[in-house]
Image (cartoon, helix red, strand yellow):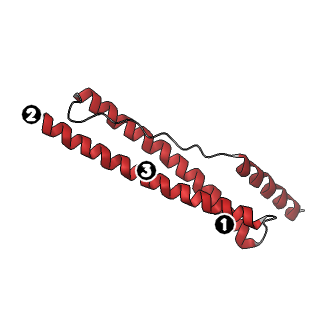
Amino acid sequence: MNTAKSLLALLALGSSMAMAECMQPESPTLPDGSSATMDDMIAGQQAVKAFQAANLEYMGCLETQFTAAKKTIEEGKASDAEALKAAYEKDVEAYNEAVSAEEALAGQFNTEIREFRAANPD
């Protein structure tokens, strides 16, 4: 009886995860530090923080998906192992791209901060 319940729970979880779609956040447009006002820079900082929070959620979603796929593949329970392996690889690649996008955005914002400080030495 417990095995049947466990199997049912696993099927329900698997089908809900398969239907869940991870939504990649859009990278914000940053202010031009050389001509921006302090308010522009603060708004830019808030946009970066909002992006980072959304990106963290996106990466968590991807990690859940590729971890589940890897486990299913390793246990030999995949009915279409090749498709699941392709989905796993796609999710891992998307995760790595999300990390790179966040690093690039942070680097770009730091450049804008330096430009802002150079243009506003007070």
Comes first in the chain, label 3 or label 1: 1
Mark 3–mark 1 Cα distance, whole angstroms, equals: 24 Å
User: Label 2: how many residues lie within 10 Å, few (<14), some (14-19) or many (20+)?
Assistant: few
CA gap between label 3 and label 2 equals: 32 Å
Q: Residue flagged by tag 1: what amino acid is it?
A: Lys
The residue at which mark 3 appears reads as 101
Who comes first in sequence, dot 3 or dot 2? 3
Residue lying at the far right of the rendered structure = 1
Which amino acid lies under the numbered mark 2 shown in the image of this protein?
Answer: Asp
* Mark positioned earlier in the residue sequence (1 or 2): 1
Is 99 displayed left or right of 118 in the figure? right
Q: Which mark is residue 86?
A: none
User: Is label 1 in contact with label 2 (beta carbons under 8 Å)?
Assistant: no
**Residue 119 rendering spot, x and y as whole percentages:** 14, 35
Give coordinates of residue 40: x percent, y percent: 28, 29
Which quarter of the rendering shows the N terminus? bottom right
Q: Depth check: 88 or 54 in front?
A: 88
Provide the secondary structure element on which disc 3 rests: helix
Coordinates of residue 82 in the picture (x, y in percent): 73, 66
Q: Secondary structure at mark 2?
A: loop
* Disc nearest the viewer among 3 and 2: 3
Residue at left offset 58%, top offset 43%:
23
Residue 70 — which label?
A: 1
- Across and down, in percent, residue 33 comes to 23, 36
Please state if 100 lies on the left or on the right of 3 as rendered: left
Which amino acid type is marked by label 3?
Ala
- Write down the residue under mark 2: 122
Residue at 38% from the left image edge and 52% from the top image edge: 103
Separation of residues labelled 1 and 2 (CA atoms)? 54 Å
Left or right: 92, with 7 as reference point: left
Q: Judging from the image, what secondary structure is the residue with disc 1 in?
A: helix
Viewer-side label of 3, 1: 3
